[in-house]
Amino acid sequence: MAEITTRIKEAIRVPHMEVNRMNSARILQCLIGEKRSLSLYALGFSYYAEMYFGFEEAWQELEDIGSWAAEYPCSPSSPSYEERISRLSVLLNMGDLHRTERLNADISRLHSSDPSVARLVINELHTMRIKDDIKTRIRENPHKLLAYVWVLYSALFNGGRFIRRQIVKAGSEFWGLTTEDGDIESFPAPLSFWSVSNDPNFQEEFKVCVNKADKLLTATESNDVVDESVWIIRRCKQLTEELDERTKKYIGSGHREVDDRDATLHSTSVTFPMRSHGFHEPKSNGGHPNACIT
């Protein structure tokens, strides 16, 4: 059977292409050109951050070996489910990839620069249940953690390269950075989420660890991981659509940054171009990014 990373790539190919087109357009419009808006970036970033908060919190619960372990029987002829999940967690735990601390620092700074975004996020985030839904899905089937680790961290390596270039183009002033914050290319807060190793050896090690972790799973569990990867991409599409609606409310509230020229920005809420290994960055075609797959 093919490696899990290859199977996931094939499974998400079609929904990924749609999400990639949607999200690439939004990130470009938020960061580049006359319609760019730090507030709209902050809004989308705050919502998408919940996906990372959700799976990293659930992961920490697994590492703490909570009561979930009692739900799974032990087999005298093979490692228990608890033991296999524990091994999987250790294999995947490449500390430089964890995003929670970085996200908290970035969101704190973004919200302090625009309290209206903070209020909108606080008022509406609970209705979206992004973090809670992800935590529940992993609690019920801890092996599905593998899907979140691969899909969401791969986005940093692949789609993240595209976004990092746009971040630099936007300039330090756009991000509210001063000389005390350091060089924009070092990605200080509110950009620290995007900082990730460019070492190809690190990326390859990550891929190897994911494929090794899959070997700890049964065939049924491995299939669950592939199915969950598809669910993640589809949830990203749904989240982007939800963000578009919430951005309309934000613009409709008469926010100070939005003028008549920006009335079309209801379709430009920022989101992450999701790419797993094997996906290239969007190529420009008359100013419109397109998904490319190897």
Image (cartoon, rainbow, N blue to C red):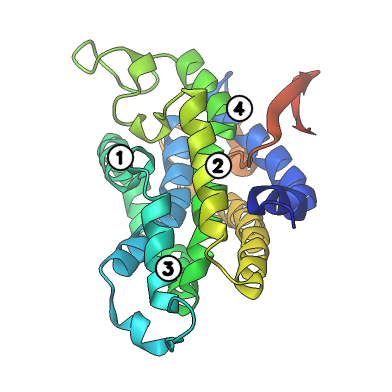
The residue under label 3 is: 85
The residue under label 4 is: 28
The residue under label 2 is: 207
4 vs 2, front mark? 2
3 vs 1, front mark? 3
**Rendered image: mark on residue 102:** 1
How crowded pointer 1 is (Cα within 10 Å; few <14, some 14-19, many 20+) is rated as some
Residue 184, quarter of the rendered image: top left
Quadrant of the frame with the C terminus: top right
Check disc 2 and report its element: helix, strand or loop: helix
Could you tell which of marks 3 and 2 lies nearer the N-terminus? 3
Could you tell which of marks 3 and 1 lies nearer the N-terminus? 3
Q: Give the amino acid at mark 1.
A: Arg
Q: Eyeballing the image, is 77 above or below 124?
A: below
Residue 126 in picture, x, y percent from top left: 40, 67
Circles 4 and 1, Cβ within 8 Å, touching? The answer is no
The CA span between labels 4 and 2 is: 28 Å
How crowded pointer 3 is (Cα within 10 Å; few <14, some 14-19, many 20+) is rated as many
- Would residue 48 be seen by someone viewing this image from the given angle? yes
Check disc 3 and report its element: helix, strand or loop: helix
Residue 139, quarter of the rendered image: bottom left
Query: Does residue 34 appear to the left or right of 67 in the view shown?
Result: right
The CA span between labels 4 and 1 is: 22 Å
Could you tell which of marks 4 and 1 lies nearer the N-terminus? 4
Residue 293 in picture, x, y percent from top left: 78, 35
Q: Give the amino acid at mark 4.
A: Leu
The CA span between labels 3 and 1 is: 26 Å
Q: Give the amino acid at mark 3.
A: Ile
Check disc 4 and report its element: helix, strand or loop: helix
Circles 3 and 2, Cβ within 8 Å, touching? The answer is no
The CA span between labels 3 and 4 is: 39 Å
